[in-house]
Amino acid sequence: MAEIRVFYQDHLVCRAICQELAGSTISLKEIEKARSERRKQVRAGLSTRTAVVEHFIAVHQEEAPPHLDDQFSHKPFATPGSPEPYPQLTFIKIS
């Protein structure tokens, strides 16, 4: 990237040119190769992260006591005639 064009409100303000890169060129094949390598790196990273997440989930599912599954399978909201599962909060304005 030898040149950057700076715009403000759809108007060209200036061009910033890197003198070291101004004379160099990159072929389309080199760009395609770099993009392909980057895609491979991203896929490998995603595969690694997916494996870590799956392992984390498996470990934590094994740790959960079986009676907790029954407790959380019900709706957490109160039904008519039953006590509320959470206490009612009251806010008091202090002057």
Image: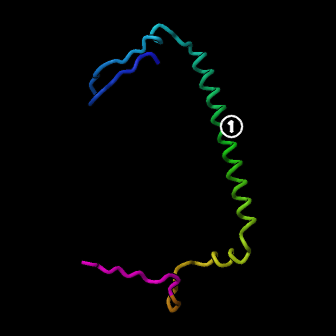
Q: Pick the quarter of the image with the C terminus.
A: bottom left
The residue positioned 39% from the left and 15% from the top of the image is: 17
Q: Nearer the viewer, residue 61 or 81?
A: 61
The residue positioned 73% from the left and 67% from the top of the image is: 63
Query: Which residue appears farthest toward the bottom when viewing the image?
Result: 81
For disc 1, the marked residue is: 44
Q: Please, is residue 72 above or below residue 51 in the view?
A: below
Query: Which residue appears farthest toward the front when viewing the image?
Result: 95
Q: Please, is residue 49 above or below residue 95 in the view?
A: above
Q: Position of residue 6 (x, y in %)?
A: 33, 24
| Number of residues whose C-alpha sits closer than 10 Å to that of mark 1, classed few (under 14), some (14–19) or many (20 or more) | few
Q: Nearer the viewer, residue 94 or 77?
A: 94
The residue positioned 69% from the left and 42% from the top of the image is: 47
The residue positioned 60% from the left and 21% from the top of the image is: 32
Task: Say left or right for 19 vs 35.
Answer: left
Q: Position of residue 72 (x, y in %)?
A: 63, 75
Q: Quadrant of residue 33?
A: top right
The magenta segment is 84-95
Q: Please, is residue 44 above or below residue 83 in the view?
A: above
Q: How many marks?
A: 1
Mainly helix, strand or loop, the magenta region? loop
Task: Say left or right for 40 vs 2.
Answer: right
Residue kind at label 1, given as amino acid type: Ala
Q: Is residue 71 magenta?
A: no
Q: Position of residue 28 (x, y in %)?
A: 56, 15
Query: Which residue appears farthest toward the right when viewing the image?
Result: 62
